[in-house]
Amino acid sequence: MTTPDEPKKPFIYFICTGNSCRSQMAEGWGRRLFGDRIDFASAGIEAHGLNPRAVRSMAEAGVDISHHQSSLIDSDLLMRADFAITLCGDANDRCPITPPSVRRLHWGFEDPARATGSEEEIMGKFHEVRDAIRERLEHFVQEEMERARQPFG
């Protein structure tokens, strides 16, 4: 987060059911790609622990999320967010009410933790979701830059 002397950076809060896969991947991508101009955090309706396959999938893409913690939604962070983005239908349905100043969005992604099959097939689903989250985030930041007609952040 920024210090009192610095201009406030936009803050995006990613929310999922268990804060174990999709929201962790989104936070990791956000920090990696745009952390110099946007603040990111993630949380869950519940805390299920960090999924080791999510950690591995992100590491394979050069992003280390192994230090992340699975956490519950922090109401102070939620109220301070510029964007609250849910990544699964359950979180979208159960996310606490946000003030009008928080732009609430839903990006539904399949849960890679529910994938079945061989380890290769399961990791393939993690890679697919990981890459889709990155693509959606890059597109979103570009849209916001164009919408604001100035650099986002």
Image (spheres, helix red, strand yellow):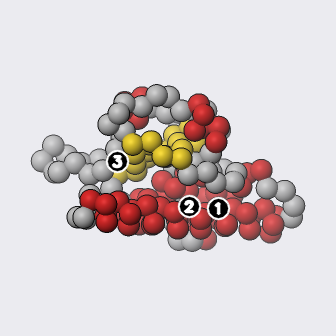
Q: Which residue sits at x=39%, y=43%? A: 103
Q: Position of residue 130 (x, y in %)?
A: 61, 63
Q: Which residue sits at x=50%, y=28%? A: 96
Instruction: Identify the residue position indicated by label 2 in the image.
Output: 133
The quarter of the picture where residue 34 lies is bottom left
- Distance of label 3 from label 2 (alpha carbons): 17 Å
Dot 3 surroundings within 10 Å: few (below 14), some, or many (20 or more)? many
Q: Which residue sits at x=73%, y=63%? A: 125
Residue 9 vertical position relative to residue 47 in the rendered view, above or below: below
Sequence-wise, the earlier of marks 3 and 1 is 3
Taking depth in this image into account, of 40 and 100 the one nearest to the observer is: 100
Instruction: Identify the residue position indicated by label 1 in the image.
Output: 129
Q: Which residue sits at x=66%, y=50%? A: 51
Q: Position of residue 13 (x, y in %)?
A: 43, 44
Q: Do callouts 2 and 1 mark residues in contact (Cβ within 8 Å)?
A: yes
Taking depth in this image into account, of 130 and 152 the one nearest to the observer is: 152
At label 1, the amino acid type is Val
Dot 1 surroundings within 10 Å: few (below 14), some, or many (20 or more)? many
Q: Position of residue 80 (x, y in %)?
A: 33, 36
Q: Do callouts 3 and 1 mark residues in contact (Cβ within 8 Å)?
A: no
Residue 107 vertical position relative to residue 141 in the rendered view, above or below: above
